[in-house]
Image (spheres, rainbow, N blue to C red):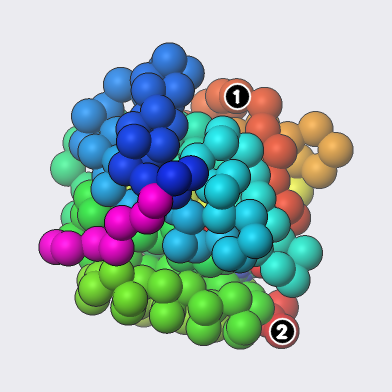
Amino acid sequence: MSLPTGIGMTSDRTRARMVDVLRRTGIRDERVLAAMMEIPRHLFVEPGIASRAYEDTPLPIGHGQTISSPSVVAMMTQLLLEKGPVAKVLEIGTGCGYQAAILAKLVKEVYTLERLAPLMDKARRNLRDLRFYNVRFKHADGHKGYPEGGPYDGILCAATASHVPAALKEQLAVGGRLVIPVGTDEQWLHVVDRTATGFTDERRDAVRFVPLLPGIA
Ligand code: SAH
């Protein structure tokens, strides 16, 4: 696949420095690091802030939403993949499509849900420009998941919920994993695994996400 390359603050070398930072923050999965090296994050943010795209920071993507910091994207992706083979993933909160592009590099099929139509359209264009054809976009409320596409080996939620939505747990395959921030003022990343007999729910790092809002707009 040939991807557009940038100059200066959006160059391959700048991206390689971001990957070095990710290694230092504890990202060990070489597949994740390679995907983060390949996907041009600067093409997903507004041109005016493209020069900051490889800093380890969240950035605005319009409509009051943010693209998560590279280390958070990498950590969530690593958690999603660490248990075993993952062929089909559901993402909640498409935003600009950056996380979906990282997932699309690593798994066969990606479904992604977004409640804001203009953001979903933008993400669709971003992924088409980069020639990803294994991502399906749905304008839908992520609380309900997308049962038509399931069950999923992995579900990644990019917005914080007051509790883990039951529908998302139900759409996990046995052996599958859900990675989701939970809480409002204080938020924690939860890792929910579906086992043959039920679910395990482990609280991990403190995080900061925009809220999972009800309905579509
Ligand atoms: N993964 C994104 C980050 C998006 S920020 C990226 O790489 O850019 C979280 C996104 O979740 C926002 O776009 C927000 O509109 C969306 N969102 C919030 N509540 C939602 C819901 N109930 N269903 C689907 N998307 C939702």
Query: Does dot 1 land on a helix, a strand or a loop?
Result: strand
Q: Are marks 1 and 2 in contact (CB under 8 Å)?
A: no
Residue shown at the point (63%, 55%) measured from the top left: 49
Amino acid on which disc 1 is placed: Asp
Do we see residue 78 in this rendering? no
Ligand 1 image position (quadrant) = bottom right
Residue 210 at x, y percent in the picture: 73, 52
Percent coordinates x, y for residue 11 in the rendering? 37, 46
Read off the magenta span.
1-7
168 vs 18: above or below: below
Q: Can residue 130 be seen here?
A: yes
Q: Measure the C-alpha gap from mark 1 to mark 2.
A: 31 Å
**From the viewer's perspective, is 84 left or right of 184?**
left
The picture quadrant where one finds residue 114 is bottom right
Say left or right for 49 vs 97.
Answer: right
- Image point 40% across, 60% down: which residue? 100
The residue that mark 2 highlights is 217
Q: Which mark is residue 205?
A: 1
For the stretch drawn in magenta, the main secondary structure is loop
Is 113 left, or right, of 74 in this rendering?
right
- SS at mark 2 in the image: loop
